Amino acid sequence: MSRRSSSAGCAALALGLAAALALPAKAATAAAPAVAPYSETVATRIQPQAEQLLLRLAKDGRGLVMDGVPVFNGEDKFLPGKIALGLTDFLTTLPADDPRRAVYLQDFRQVAKLTVDDANDTWGIYYYLSALNALRKAGLLRAAVDPLTLAKLRVRLDWRSFVDVDDFSLIDHPNNYYGVAFAIARLRMQMGWEDGAGAERLLDKVLAHYRAYSGDFGFADETDGDGRFDRYSVLLAAELSQRFLETGGRPPPEILGYLKKSAEVMLARLNPEGEGFEYGRSLGPYGETAIVEVLTAAAVLGVLDARQKDMAYAFAARAGQRYVDFWINPATGSVDLWDRGRRTDAYRGKFRILGENLSLAHQYVYTSAAWDALGYRGAAPMAGYDRALDALPRRSVTWFARGTYDRALVTLRDRGHVIGLPLVNGAATQHMHNPYFPIPYSPGMLAGVPDGTAPLLTPQFTLADGAVLAPLAWFRDVKVGAKGQATTVRYRLAAMDRLGEASPVVDDRLSATTTYEFTPGHIRRTDVYTAKGPLPLKGIAMAFGAFSEDPVMRGASASFGKGAVRRFSATGFEGCRAVEPGPDDRTPTGAFRSRIDCASGPRTLSGPITISWSIDYD
């Protein structure tokens, strides 16, 4: 927005929103069932929260400060689009005879004029075009945007701003941005601003990437074959599917095939609390909406059977309720990814506070509308959801890629926990961060630290020459075995990842074989490391961050007085000790309550050494 955003236009927006918020309590104070219908949570709790923020925006304009952060700080390059979409999500729900609609249309017209010159990149372009297209379909575009502003937007809301039109390569963006560019091209086509040629070329780029780096496995590598398969690798098929649905089309069979595979991954993660995807970057509430978005698209497109659809809806209802009960801070009225012991990565820094509120609200609004259209409006979640969860497979293996290096995700369900073991490469900028380590993650029990580099459950070897080596990147011969309730995962690494560079660096002075053993209530990892020749070390270090409390140390074993993890022990170190968690021991959902550090001092490796750890949990 320009500095004029505190003008009469914003005053009108404030009055309009105030009128909306003065409506009868939207049932927010009424007694609700343990898990409310999804549409009820969205209409009575999520949308009013977003509307309150728009009211504050209208009142304060460019001076808006949220929880101590100036919103218009110039760092959130998606913000104008998110504001437009937030306004549109509310505007398009008003019936034609609602007297407030004319006020809101004028409000949108003023805000669009005031923000048209602000920086608005990639995702922001998509959000803005999605808003304009929704207004167009509702017959409201001319009333909402004046001709000059619309002409400016037609020039500025363009995928060519980050795609080279000569060879259709992305300009300084990871490969998932092909999906963003495709969505923008489809929407520009809907707006009558271009033909479909650009969208077709961009879709071809997306599909070629799937085929080249995952093949028949059907997942998106965020890199050009380096093996970064994470939340977004699973989500992308649903986003592509939704872009077709949003623009009046149906995804081609190839994308539907990818969506089915993504739905299988997310179905394996359903849980009673509405908690989300467990490893990689940009989690927090986005780990939860990722599951909701994938399963919603799968439900709409007939990928799920009737029981799966009911389970997916029951999860969406829980995730929506968790969003307002857990992620929204009642003291600030904002989603909280950054405080009260929580932490997110630099990409989602607090400088994006308003935009995060609006984009998360939108994800719940549009998926709720999809479930409404499927006949679930006002429907209570299925009875017997917990029993249905118990009937899900106790183990599943998702292959992302196989070949020179294997990439896989092993998922286990035990004692109410969903445990994921990813064997992926964080690749450039992420390989050193422990949310990508080859260790188990489980909501509320085992977690990584966003942008954290501590050696969580993964030994780091500091060599005499100062190099730091870790077993992180190049997995070969991955084998998953099952016998009764026991699951075994084995792999080898012919080289370590030498830390310190943006990208992984091969260092073959040390190799390893790793074995995981999962049995009910127990996880054990055993590594055998072999030096290529005599290898002088300064030391070996490893850490365990726990949500459990009151650790009591007995040698290299810690027993916890409270929490899901009851015992942690390690072998192969000179000793382990309990230390107070520090400011860097914060996860997306909250701070570790305990930390155990294990270490060994200088020595020279001249033969194989074995390092192991085990966890017992309730």
Image (cartoon, helix red, strand yellow):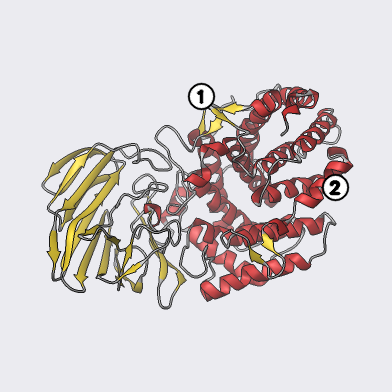
What residue is disc 2 on? Answer: 151
358 left or right, relative to 15? left
What residue is disc 1 on? Answer: 331
239 left or right, relative to 559? right
- The alpha-carbon separation of the residues under discs 1 and 2 comes to 41 Å
In this view of the protein, which residue sits in the foreground, 561 or 311? 561
Counting other residues with Cα less than 10 Å from the Cα at mark 2, is it few (<14), some (14-19), or many (20 or more)? few
- What secondary structure is marked by label 2? helix
Quadrant of residue 95 in the image? top right
In this view of the protein, which residue sits in the foreground, 469 or 491? 469
Residue placed at 14% from the left, 54% from the top? 601
Measuring from the top left, give residue 509's x and y in whole percent: 25, 70
Residue placed at 65% from the left, 26% from the top? 63
Q: Is residue 255 visible?
A: yes
Measuring from the top left, give residue 515's x and y in whole percent: 26, 67
Work out which residue is located at the far bottom of the displayed protein and give it.
403
Instruction: Say what amino acid the circle numbered 2 marks.
Output: Ala
Work out which residue is located at the far front of the displayed protein and give it.
465
